Image (tube, rainbow, N blue to C red):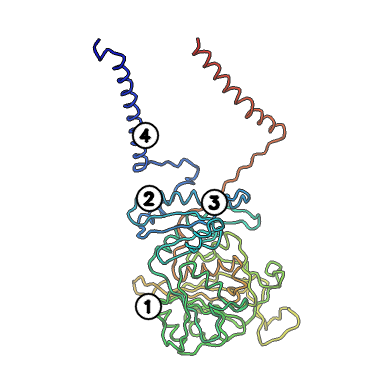
Protein backbone atom coordinates (compact mmCIF):
# COMPACT_ATOMS: atom_id res chain seq x y z
CA UNK A 1 0.00 0.00 0.00
CA UNK A 2 1.29 3.42 -0.95
CA UNK A 3 2.10 5.74 1.99
CA UNK A 4 -0.31 8.40 0.74
CA UNK A 5 -3.16 5.87 1.01
CA UNK A 6 -2.24 4.66 4.51
CA UNK A 7 -3.95 5.60 7.78
CA UNK A 8 -0.70 7.15 8.99
CA UNK A 9 -0.71 9.60 6.11
CA UNK A 10 -4.34 10.45 6.82
CA UNK A 11 -3.52 11.19 10.46
CA UNK A 12 -0.63 13.44 9.40
CA UNK A 13 -2.85 15.26 6.92
CA UNK A 14 -5.52 15.76 9.59
CA UNK A 15 -2.87 17.00 12.06
CA UNK A 16 -1.39 19.43 9.54
CA UNK A 17 -4.88 20.61 8.62
CA UNK A 18 -5.75 21.30 12.25
CA UNK A 19 -2.38 22.98 12.78
CA UNK A 20 -2.92 25.22 9.74
CA UNK A 21 -6.41 26.06 10.95
CA UNK A 22 -5.03 27.06 14.34
CA UNK A 23 -2.26 29.13 12.74
CA UNK A 24 -4.73 30.82 10.39
CA UNK A 25 -7.12 31.50 13.28
CA UNK A 26 -4.33 33.04 15.37
CA UNK A 27 -3.15 35.07 12.36
CA UNK A 28 -6.70 36.30 11.76
CA UNK A 29 -7.15 37.13 15.45
CA UNK A 30 -3.79 38.92 15.61
CA UNK A 31 -4.47 40.82 12.38
CA UNK A 32 -7.87 42.00 13.59
CA UNK A 33 -6.34 43.17 16.86
CA UNK A 34 -3.58 45.02 14.99
CA UNK A 35 -6.12 46.74 12.75
CA UNK A 36 -8.33 47.58 15.72
CA UNK A 37 -5.36 49.01 17.63
CA UNK A 38 -3.86 51.10 14.85
CA UNK A 39 -6.76 51.73 12.49
CA UNK A 40 -9.80 51.81 14.75
CA UNK A 41 -13.12 53.37 13.95
CA UNK A 42 -15.36 54.44 16.80
CA UNK A 43 -18.97 55.49 16.49
CA UNK A 44 -20.85 57.33 19.20
CA UNK A 45 -24.54 56.61 18.75
CA UNK A 46 -25.62 57.99 22.12
CA UNK A 47 -28.03 60.90 22.33
CA UNK A 48 -26.13 64.18 22.20
CA UNK A 49 -22.84 62.31 21.54
CA UNK A 50 -22.22 62.01 25.28
CA UNK A 51 -19.19 59.75 24.81
CA UNK A 52 -17.30 61.92 22.29
CA UNK A 53 -14.97 64.88 22.78
CA UNK A 54 -15.87 68.17 21.16
CA UNK A 55 -14.07 69.46 18.08
CA UNK A 56 -12.53 72.24 20.21
CA UNK A 57 -10.97 69.78 22.66
CA UNK A 58 -9.65 67.62 19.81
CA UNK A 59 -8.05 70.68 18.23
CA UNK A 60 -6.32 71.61 21.50
CA UNK A 61 -5.09 68.06 22.13
CA UNK A 62 -3.68 67.73 18.61
CA UNK A 63 -1.54 70.81 19.26
CA UNK A 64 -0.47 69.74 22.75
CA UNK A 65 3.31 70.02 23.00
CA UNK A 66 3.98 68.51 26.44
CA UNK A 67 2.94 65.30 28.20
CA UNK A 68 0.35 65.72 30.93
CA UNK A 69 -0.15 63.23 33.75
CA UNK A 70 -3.54 63.07 35.42
CA UNK A 71 -3.90 61.47 38.85
CA UNK A 72 -7.42 60.72 40.07
CA UNK A 73 -7.87 60.04 43.78
CA UNK A 74 -11.54 59.24 43.31
CA UNK A 75 -12.67 55.66 43.97
CA UNK A 76 -15.71 53.69 42.88
CA UNK A 77 -17.41 53.89 46.27
CA UNK A 78 -20.58 51.82 45.99
CA UNK A 79 -21.75 53.06 49.41
CA UNK A 80 -21.87 56.64 48.13
CA UNK A 81 -23.94 56.92 44.91
CA UNK A 82 -22.77 60.49 44.24
CA UNK A 83 -19.09 59.50 44.33
CA UNK A 84 -19.81 56.39 42.27
CA UNK A 85 -21.53 58.53 39.63
CA UNK A 86 -18.62 60.98 39.60
CA UNK A 87 -16.17 58.09 39.21
CA UNK A 88 -18.07 56.75 36.18
CA UNK A 89 -18.37 60.20 34.60
CA UNK A 90 -14.68 61.04 34.98
CA UNK A 91 -13.28 57.62 34.11
CA UNK A 92 -15.33 57.49 30.91
CA UNK A 93 -14.26 61.01 29.93
CA UNK A 94 -10.57 60.41 30.70
CA UNK A 95 -10.58 57.30 28.50
CA UNK A 96 -11.43 59.56 25.57
CA UNK A 97 -8.50 61.86 26.35
CA UNK A 98 -5.98 59.01 26.54
CA UNK A 99 -7.40 57.37 23.42
CA UNK A 100 -7.16 60.56 21.38
CA UNK A 101 -3.49 61.19 22.32
CA UNK A 102 -2.28 57.55 22.35
CA UNK A 103 -0.50 57.80 18.98
CA UNK A 104 0.93 61.28 19.54
CA UNK A 105 4.73 61.55 19.55
CA UNK A 106 4.47 64.32 22.16
CA UNK A 107 1.63 65.73 24.14
CA UNK A 108 0.22 62.47 25.51
CA UNK A 109 -2.32 62.25 28.31
CA UNK A 110 -1.49 59.63 30.95
CA UNK A 111 -4.19 58.80 33.52
CA UNK A 112 -3.71 56.93 36.79
CA UNK A 113 -6.21 56.19 39.54
CA UNK A 114 -4.66 56.26 43.02
CA UNK A 115 -6.38 55.37 46.29
CA UNK A 116 -4.73 57.67 48.83
CA UNK A 117 -5.86 55.46 51.73
CA UNK A 118 -4.89 52.01 50.45
CA UNK A 119 -1.75 53.07 48.54
CA UNK A 120 -0.16 55.46 51.00
CA UNK A 121 3.41 54.99 49.75
CA UNK A 122 2.51 55.64 46.12
CA UNK A 123 0.36 58.62 47.13
CA UNK A 124 3.20 60.15 49.15
CA UNK A 125 5.66 59.64 46.27
CA UNK A 126 3.27 61.45 43.94
CA UNK A 127 2.51 64.13 46.56
CA UNK A 128 -1.17 63.19 46.63
CA UNK A 129 -2.85 63.86 49.94
CA UNK A 130 -6.46 64.81 49.29
CA UNK A 131 -9.12 62.25 48.26
CA UNK A 132 -11.75 62.84 45.58
CA UNK A 133 -9.71 65.28 43.50
CA UNK A 134 -8.12 65.30 40.05
CA UNK A 135 -4.48 66.40 39.93
CA UNK A 136 -2.95 67.57 36.64
CA UNK A 137 0.86 67.55 36.41
CA UNK A 138 3.04 68.77 33.56
CA UNK A 139 6.70 69.28 34.42
CA UNK A 140 6.87 71.64 37.40
CA UNK A 141 3.30 72.81 36.89
CA UNK A 142 0.58 71.28 39.00
CA UNK A 143 -3.13 71.92 39.40
CA UNK A 144 -5.62 70.37 41.83
CA UNK A 145 -9.23 70.21 40.65
CA UNK A 146 -12.08 69.42 43.03
CA UNK A 147 -15.30 67.65 42.10
CA UNK A 148 -17.25 70.91 42.40
CA UNK A 149 -15.44 72.18 39.29
CA UNK A 150 -16.87 69.36 37.17
CA UNK A 151 -20.56 69.82 37.86
CA UNK A 152 -23.25 72.43 37.70
CA UNK A 153 -25.32 71.99 40.85
CA UNK A 154 -28.85 73.11 41.62
CA UNK A 155 -28.50 74.12 45.26
CA UNK A 156 -32.23 74.52 45.75
CA UNK A 157 -32.91 70.90 44.81
CA UNK A 158 -29.54 69.67 46.05
CA UNK A 159 -28.65 67.69 42.93
CA UNK A 160 -26.30 67.87 39.97
CA UNK A 161 -27.78 69.27 36.78
CA UNK A 162 -25.02 68.88 34.22
CA UNK A 163 -21.49 67.55 33.80
CA UNK A 164 -18.87 70.19 32.97
CA UNK A 165 -15.98 67.72 32.95
CA UNK A 166 -14.75 68.23 29.39
CA UNK A 167 -14.66 72.02 29.63
CA UNK A 168 -12.95 71.93 33.05
CA UNK A 169 -10.41 69.25 32.09
CA UNK A 170 -9.49 70.87 28.78
CA UNK A 171 -8.99 74.24 30.49
CA UNK A 172 -6.87 72.57 33.19
CA UNK A 173 -4.71 70.76 30.63
CA UNK A 174 -4.12 73.98 28.71
CA UNK A 175 -3.25 75.67 32.00
CA UNK A 176 -0.59 73.24 33.26
CA UNK A 177 0.88 72.56 29.80
CA UNK A 178 1.60 76.25 29.32
CA UNK A 179 5.33 76.67 30.08
CA UNK A 180 4.79 80.18 31.44
CA UNK A 181 3.58 80.44 35.04
CA UNK A 182 1.76 83.72 35.67
CA UNK A 183 3.10 85.77 38.59
CA UNK A 184 0.68 87.42 41.04
CA UNK A 185 1.95 90.08 43.45
CA UNK A 186 0.26 91.07 46.71
CA UNK A 187 0.85 94.76 47.38
CA UNK A 188 2.47 95.37 50.79
CA UNK A 189 3.57 98.33 52.91
CA UNK A 190 0.17 99.80 53.84
CA UNK A 191 -1.17 97.22 56.29
CA UNK A 192 -2.56 94.97 53.54
CA UNK A 193 -3.59 91.39 54.25
CA UNK A 194 -0.68 88.98 53.77
CA UNK A 195 -0.66 85.76 51.73
CA UNK A 196 1.34 83.94 54.42
CA UNK A 197 -0.88 84.95 57.35
CA UNK A 198 -2.96 82.12 58.87
CA UNK A 199 -5.17 84.41 60.96
CA UNK A 200 -8.85 83.58 60.22
CA UNK A 201 -9.96 87.23 60.10
CA UNK A 202 -7.04 88.92 58.32
CA UNK A 203 -5.00 86.10 56.82
CA UNK A 204 -4.88 85.03 53.17
CA UNK A 205 -2.98 81.75 53.50
CA UNK A 206 -5.90 79.67 52.20
CA UNK A 207 -6.31 82.01 49.24
CA UNK A 208 -2.58 81.79 48.52
CA UNK A 209 -2.74 77.98 48.52
CA UNK A 210 -5.71 78.05 46.15
CA UNK A 211 -3.79 80.25 43.72
CA UNK A 212 -0.69 78.04 43.84
CA UNK A 213 -2.78 74.92 43.23
CA UNK A 214 -3.98 76.60 40.03
CA UNK A 215 -0.47 77.12 38.69
CA UNK A 216 0.04 80.75 39.77
CA UNK A 217 3.26 82.02 41.30
CA UNK A 218 2.67 84.23 44.36
CA UNK A 219 4.89 86.94 45.86
CA UNK A 220 4.71 90.22 47.80
CA UNK A 221 5.49 93.67 46.40
CA UNK A 222 6.45 96.75 48.45
CA UNK A 223 6.74 99.70 46.09
CA UNK A 224 8.36 101.87 48.77
CA UNK A 225 11.33 99.48 48.62
CA UNK A 226 11.47 98.35 44.97
CA UNK A 227 10.33 101.68 43.43
CA UNK A 228 9.20 99.72 40.37
CA UNK A 229 6.67 97.12 39.34
CA UNK A 230 8.39 93.90 38.18
CA UNK A 231 8.26 93.06 34.50
CA UNK A 232 6.76 89.62 35.21
CA UNK A 233 3.77 91.04 37.12
CA UNK A 234 0.70 89.48 35.48
CA UNK A 235 -1.59 90.78 38.23
CA UNK A 236 -1.37 92.96 41.34
CA UNK A 237 -3.71 92.29 44.27
CA UNK A 238 -4.41 95.12 46.72
CA UNK A 239 -6.42 93.54 49.53
CA UNK A 240 -7.51 95.19 52.76
CA UNK A 241 -5.04 98.05 52.99
CA UNK A 242 -5.13 99.99 56.27
CA UNK A 243 -3.52 103.22 55.07
CA UNK A 244 -3.28 105.19 51.82
CA UNK A 245 -0.62 104.59 49.19
CA UNK A 246 1.92 107.33 48.57
CA UNK A 247 1.44 109.59 45.52
CA UNK A 248 4.50 108.12 43.75
CA UNK A 249 3.11 104.61 44.31
CA UNK A 250 -0.25 105.59 42.83
CA UNK A 251 1.56 107.01 39.82
CA UNK A 252 3.43 103.74 39.28
CA UNK A 253 0.18 101.79 39.48
CA UNK A 254 -1.49 104.20 37.00
CA UNK A 255 1.39 103.80 34.55
CA UNK A 256 1.27 100.02 35.02
CA UNK A 257 -2.39 99.97 33.97
CA UNK A 258 -2.12 102.54 31.19
CA UNK A 259 1.21 101.96 29.47
CA UNK A 260 1.83 98.28 30.29
CA UNK A 261 -1.77 97.07 30.01
CA UNK A 262 -1.51 95.95 33.62
CA UNK A 263 -4.07 94.10 35.71
CA UNK A 264 -5.15 95.08 39.23
CA UNK A 265 -7.78 93.72 41.63
CA UNK A 266 -8.54 96.25 44.37
CA UNK A 267 -10.46 95.12 47.47
CA UNK A 268 -11.22 97.95 49.92
CA UNK A 269 -12.67 97.66 53.40
CA UNK A 270 -15.01 100.40 54.71
CA UNK A 271 -13.51 103.23 56.68
CA UNK A 272 -10.03 103.07 55.15
CA UNK A 273 -8.28 105.74 53.10
CA UNK A 274 -6.81 104.25 49.93
CA UNK A 275 -5.11 107.15 48.16
CA UNK A 276 -6.08 105.83 44.70
CA UNK A 277 -8.60 108.50 43.73
CA UNK A 278 -6.77 109.50 40.52
CA UNK A 279 -6.36 105.89 39.43
CA UNK A 280 -10.07 105.16 39.98
CA UNK A 281 -11.01 108.35 38.12
CA UNK A 282 -8.94 107.19 35.13
CA UNK A 283 -10.96 103.97 34.94
CA UNK A 284 -14.43 105.39 35.57
CA UNK A 285 -15.05 103.97 39.04
CA UNK A 286 -16.25 105.69 42.22
CA UNK A 287 -15.63 104.23 45.70
CA UNK A 288 -17.80 105.75 48.43
CA UNK A 289 -16.99 105.77 52.12
CA UNK A 290 -20.57 104.73 52.98
CA UNK A 291 -21.09 101.38 54.68
CA UNK A 292 -23.83 99.22 53.16
CA UNK A 293 -26.94 98.42 55.19
CA UNK A 294 -29.25 95.85 53.60
CA UNK A 295 -32.10 94.54 55.76
CA UNK A 296 -33.70 92.48 52.99
CA UNK A 297 -34.26 88.95 54.42
CA UNK A 298 -32.54 87.45 51.38
CA UNK A 299 -29.50 89.64 52.02
CA UNK A 300 -28.92 88.65 55.63
CA UNK A 301 -27.44 85.47 57.05
CA UNK A 302 -28.15 83.99 60.46
CA UNK A 303 -25.03 85.77 61.74
CA UNK A 304 -26.23 89.11 60.30
CA UNK A 305 -23.57 89.01 57.60
CA UNK A 306 -24.24 90.44 54.16
CA UNK A 307 -25.31 87.88 51.55
CA UNK A 308 -24.80 89.08 47.99
CA UNK A 309 -27.27 87.56 45.54
CA UNK A 310 -27.82 90.12 42.77
CA UNK A 311 -25.31 89.37 39.99
CA UNK A 312 -25.20 90.68 36.44
CA UNK A 313 -24.18 88.30 33.66
CA UNK A 314 -21.29 89.79 31.69
CA UNK A 315 -20.56 88.37 28.20
CA UNK A 316 -17.14 90.08 28.13
CA UNK A 317 -15.72 88.66 31.35
CA UNK A 318 -17.96 85.66 32.25
CA UNK A 319 -17.00 86.32 35.89
CA UNK A 320 -20.47 85.72 37.30
CA UNK A 321 -21.62 82.96 34.93
CA UNK A 322 -20.84 80.06 37.25
CA UNK A 323 -22.31 81.81 40.29
CA UNK A 324 -25.56 82.57 38.45
CA UNK A 325 -25.83 79.10 36.88
CA UNK A 326 -25.25 77.34 40.20
CA UNK A 327 -27.03 79.93 42.40
CA UNK A 328 -23.99 80.18 44.67
CA UNK A 329 -24.18 82.56 47.65
CA UNK A 330 -21.45 85.10 48.37
CA UNK A 331 -21.17 86.06 52.04
CA UNK A 332 -19.14 89.01 53.38
CA UNK A 333 -18.90 91.23 56.41
CA UNK A 334 -18.99 95.06 56.25
CA UNK A 335 -18.83 96.43 52.70
CA UNK A 336 -18.65 99.84 51.07
CA UNK A 337 -20.33 101.17 47.94
CA UNK A 338 -18.58 100.85 44.55
CA UNK A 339 -20.28 102.18 41.40
CA UNK A 340 -19.66 103.32 37.85
CA UNK A 341 -18.78 106.94 37.31
CA UNK A 342 -21.67 108.08 35.12
CA UNK A 343 -19.75 111.26 34.37
CA UNK A 344 -16.77 109.48 32.80
CA UNK A 345 -16.04 110.09 29.13
CA UNK A 346 -17.66 107.62 26.72
CA UNK A 347 -14.89 108.08 24.16
CA UNK A 348 -11.93 106.93 26.21
CA UNK A 349 -12.18 103.28 25.12
CA UNK A 350 -13.34 102.04 28.52
CA UNK A 351 -15.95 99.39 29.18
CA UNK A 352 -17.27 99.65 32.76
CA UNK A 353 -19.69 97.06 34.17
CA UNK A 354 -21.29 96.67 37.57
CA UNK A 355 -21.40 92.94 38.31
CA UNK A 356 -22.50 92.66 41.96
CA UNK A 357 -25.10 94.78 43.74
CA UNK A 358 -27.28 94.79 46.83
CA UNK A 359 -31.07 94.63 46.95
CA UNK A 360 -33.01 97.71 45.90
CA UNK A 361 -33.87 98.48 49.54
CA UNK A 362 -30.26 98.84 50.70
CA UNK A 363 -28.68 102.15 51.63
CA UNK A 364 -25.23 103.48 52.52
CA UNK A 365 -24.51 104.97 55.92
CA UNK A 366 -21.74 107.62 56.27
CA UNK A 367 -18.95 106.51 58.55
CA UNK A 368 -18.96 109.87 60.30
CA UNK A 369 -22.48 109.33 61.62
CA UNK A 370 -22.96 106.99 64.58
CA UNK A 371 -26.41 105.48 64.98
CA UNK A 372 -28.21 103.33 67.45
CA UNK A 373 -31.06 102.45 65.07
CA UNK A 374 -30.66 101.17 61.53
CA UNK A 375 -33.04 103.33 59.52
CA UNK A 376 -32.74 105.25 56.26
CA UNK A 377 -32.34 109.04 56.61
CA UNK A 378 -33.08 110.94 53.37
CA UNK A 379 -30.50 113.54 52.44
CA UNK A 380 -27.85 111.92 54.61
CA UNK A 381 -27.71 108.30 53.53
CA UNK A 382 -26.87 107.05 50.05
CA UNK A 383 -29.54 105.17 48.11
CA UNK A 384 -29.73 104.28 44.43
CA UNK A 385 -32.65 103.16 42.31
CA UNK A 386 -31.31 99.72 41.35
CA UNK A 387 -29.42 98.96 44.54
CA UNK A 388 -25.89 99.77 45.62
CA UNK A 389 -22.91 98.43 43.70
CA UNK A 390 -20.38 96.19 45.42
CA UNK A 391 -18.17 95.13 42.50
CA UNK A 392 -17.27 96.96 39.28
CA UNK A 393 -14.87 95.94 36.52
CA UNK A 394 -13.32 98.23 33.96
CA UNK A 395 -11.19 97.43 30.93
CA UNK A 396 -9.81 99.35 28.01
CA UNK A 397 -11.09 97.83 24.79
CA UNK A 398 -9.41 100.31 22.42
CA UNK A 399 -6.72 103.02 22.57
CA UNK A 400 -8.04 106.32 23.87
CA UNK A 401 -6.48 108.10 20.88
CA UNK A 402 -8.71 106.10 18.46
CA UNK A 403 -5.80 104.65 16.53
CA UNK A 404 -6.87 101.80 14.20
CA UNK A 405 -4.84 99.25 16.18
CA UNK A 406 -5.69 96.22 18.25
CA UNK A 407 -3.93 96.96 21.52
CA UNK A 408 -4.15 94.77 24.61
CA UNK A 409 -5.68 97.03 27.27
CA UNK A 410 -5.48 97.13 31.02
CA UNK A 411 -8.06 95.65 33.37
CA UNK A 412 -9.20 96.78 36.81
CA UNK A 413 -11.65 95.13 39.21
CA UNK A 414 -12.77 96.94 42.37
CA UNK A 415 -14.68 95.31 45.24
CA UNK A 416 -16.08 97.13 48.24
CA UNK A 417 -14.85 94.54 50.75
CA UNK A 418 -11.68 92.58 51.46
CA UNK A 419 -13.54 90.29 53.85
CA UNK A 420 -14.55 88.20 50.84
CA UNK A 421 -11.22 86.32 50.68
CA UNK A 422 -10.07 85.99 54.29
CA UNK A 423 -9.32 82.52 55.63
CA UNK A 424 -12.70 82.18 57.32
CA UNK A 425 -14.64 83.44 54.26
CA UNK A 426 -12.87 81.94 51.26
CA UNK A 427 -14.12 78.47 52.19
CA UNK A 428 -17.57 79.60 51.05
CA UNK A 429 -17.98 78.20 47.55
CA UNK A 430 -19.42 81.39 46.10
CA UNK A 431 -16.63 83.56 47.53
CA UNK A 432 -13.88 81.40 46.09
CA UNK A 433 -15.68 81.07 42.76
CA UNK A 434 -16.16 84.83 42.39
CA UNK A 435 -12.55 85.66 43.25
CA UNK A 436 -10.97 82.96 41.05
CA UNK A 437 -13.20 83.93 38.14
CA UNK A 438 -12.09 87.55 38.56
CA UNK A 439 -8.43 86.49 38.61
CA UNK A 440 -8.97 84.35 35.51
CA UNK A 441 -10.53 87.29 33.68
CA UNK A 442 -7.75 89.64 34.79
CA UNK A 443 -4.90 87.44 33.55
CA UNK A 444 -6.86 86.21 30.51
CA UNK A 445 -6.96 82.55 31.40
CA UNK A 446 -9.33 80.92 28.94
CA UNK A 447 -11.51 78.96 31.34
CA UNK A 448 -14.70 79.69 29.39
CA UNK A 449 -14.23 77.25 26.54
CA UNK A 450 -17.02 76.88 24.01
CA UNK A 451 -17.78 73.32 25.12
CA UNK A 452 -21.41 72.58 26.01
CA UNK A 453 -22.13 70.83 29.32
CA UNK A 454 -23.44 67.28 29.25
CA UNK A 455 -26.84 66.88 30.90
CA UNK A 456 -27.06 64.29 33.64
CA UNK A 457 -29.80 61.86 32.70
CA UNK A 458 -31.71 60.19 35.49
CA UNK A 459 -34.06 57.27 34.98
CA UNK A 460 -36.48 55.98 37.55
CA UNK A 461 -38.44 52.75 37.20
CA UNK A 462 -41.67 52.80 39.20
CA UNK A 463 -43.25 49.35 39.58
CA UNK A 464 -46.13 48.19 41.72
CA UNK A 465 -45.78 45.08 43.86
CA UNK A 466 -47.79 43.02 41.36
CA UNK A 467 -45.66 44.21 38.43
CA UNK A 468 -42.50 43.45 40.39
CA UNK A 469 -43.69 39.86 41.02
CA UNK A 470 -44.44 39.37 37.32
CA UNK A 471 -41.00 40.74 36.40
CA UNK A 472 -39.31 38.31 38.76
CA UNK A 473 -41.30 35.36 37.35
CA UNK A 474 -40.38 36.40 33.84
CA UNK A 475 -36.66 36.70 34.62
CA UNK A 476 -36.29 33.59 36.78
CA UNK A 477 -38.83 31.18 35.19
CA UNK A 478 -40.08 32.17 31.74
CA UNK A 479 -36.78 33.19 30.12
CA UNK A 480 -34.81 30.16 31.43
CA UNK A 481 -37.77 27.92 30.50
CA UNK A 482 -37.80 29.15 26.90
CA UNK A 483 -34.04 28.59 26.60
CA UNK A 484 -34.39 25.05 28.04
CA UNK A 485 -37.23 24.28 25.63
CA UNK A 486 -35.17 25.39 22.65
CA UNK A 487 -32.28 23.21 23.87
CA UNK A 488 -34.52 20.14 24.13
CA UNK A 489 -35.92 20.83 20.65
CA UNK A 490 -32.45 21.06 19.12
CA UNK A 491 -31.36 17.85 20.89
CA UNK A 492 -34.44 15.98 19.68
CA UNK A 493 -34.00 17.21 16.10
CA UNK A 494 -30.31 16.17 15.94
CA UNK A 495 -31.06 12.75 17.44
CA UNK A 496 -33.65 11.92 14.78
Residue on which the image places disc 1: 401
Q: Nearer the viewer, mark 4 or mark 3?
A: 4
Residue underneath mark 2 = 102
Q: Residues within 10 Å of mark 2 (few under 14, many from 20)?
A: some
Q: Nearer the viewer, mark 1 or mark 2?
A: 2
The answer to whether residue 385 is visible is no
Image spot of residue 35 (x, y percent): 34, 39
Q: Nearer the viewer, mark 2 or mark 4?
A: 4
- Labelled pair 3, 1 in contact (Cβ < 8 Å): no
The answer to whether residue 440 of the structure is visible from this angle is yes
Depicted 9 relative to depicted 368: above or below: above
The circle on residue 87 is 3
Q: Could you say which quadrant of the image residue 233 lies in?
A: bottom left
C-alpha separation, residue under disc 1 versus residue under disc 2: 51 Å
Q: CA distance from mark 3 to mark 1?
A: 54 Å
Q: Position of residue 149 (x, y in %)?
A: 53, 60
Q: Secondary structure at mark 1?
A: loop
Amino acid sequence: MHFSDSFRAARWIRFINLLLQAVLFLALFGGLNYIALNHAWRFDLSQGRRHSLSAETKSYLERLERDVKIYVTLTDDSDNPELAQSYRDLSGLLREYTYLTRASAKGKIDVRFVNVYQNRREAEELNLEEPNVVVLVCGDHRRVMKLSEFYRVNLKEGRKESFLGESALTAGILDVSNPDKKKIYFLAGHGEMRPDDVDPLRGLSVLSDELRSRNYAVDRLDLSITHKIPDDAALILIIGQQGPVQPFEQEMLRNYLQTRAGRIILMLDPGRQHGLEDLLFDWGIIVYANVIVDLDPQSLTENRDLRLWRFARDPLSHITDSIIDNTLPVVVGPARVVTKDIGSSKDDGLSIRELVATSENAWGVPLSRQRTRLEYIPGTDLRMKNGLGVMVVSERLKPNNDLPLSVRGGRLAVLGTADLVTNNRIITVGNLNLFLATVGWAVEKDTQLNIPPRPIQRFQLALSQEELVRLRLGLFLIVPGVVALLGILVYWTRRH
